[in-house]
Amino acid sequence: MFTRYLLVSLTYLLQSASSEATQTIASVDDYQLQRSCAIPCWWLGDPDDNDSSDVLGRRLQCCDGVPCRDVKDSCYCRPDLRVSASSHLSECVVRRCENEVDFSTAMNIYDDYCREKRDAASEPAETEATATVDLENEAEETAIDRGPGNQATADGSSSGAVIPVFGAFLVLGFSTLAIAMSIVI
């Protein structure tokens, strides 16, 4: 029971952290390769400068003021705002670049960026569900494989009370998390 609660809590925290990340579309390779006429439809100024403004983020109403900075992926990539993003990019890019090809490129950049962010946000949940099943199987196997008198005890000896011990380690990105050490007496 404790194990499931811990895993559900960890999943929620990881998804919250990834959805609160600030959008970084200007650092995507394809963004850098688009024609310069399309750039002002995304940003006014250099995205790395503090006085620049996220034009698309402002258009999507993901920020209140000007300059619009630090727009969260959770707003920028909301599926229900894709139509608004498409409308803005269509109007702006076609007007500035005078062709549909640059608009298609801009929409591909937006869609690919947001798909990557959604996939990254959903990965921990899938991994957590697998870990839960593994923990249950491990606990069940531990209880079956060890008979009375063959159990581990708190001091490391093999006699005395039944204390199945199990643990799981979960690797997420660059960090390794030790999860769910529990002792059942």
Image: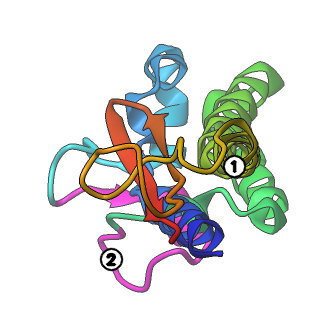
Question: Judging from the image, what secondary structure is the residue with disc 2 in?
Answer: loop
> Type of residue at label 1?
Ala
> Which quadrant of the structure image shows residue 66?
bottom left
Q: Is residue 19 above or below residue 114?
A: below
Which residue carries the number 1 mark?
143
Q: Does label 2 or label 1 sit earlier along the sequence?
A: 2
Please report the residue visible at 53 percent of the width from the left and 41 percent of the height from the top: 150
In this rendering, would 49 be left or right of 120? left
> Type of residue at label 2?
Val
In this rendering, would 49 be left or right of 70? left
Residue 76 at x, y percent in the picture: 59, 60
Residue 71 at x, y percent in the picture: 43, 65
The span from disc 2 to disc 1 (Cα, nearest Å) is 61 Å
Sort mark 2 into few (<14), some (14-19) or many (20+) by Cα contacts within 10 Å. few
Q: Which residues are magenta?
A: 51-68
Viewer can see residue 102: yes
Q: Main secondary structure of the magenta part?
A: loop
Q: From the viewer's side, name the closer residue of 156 and 135.
A: 156
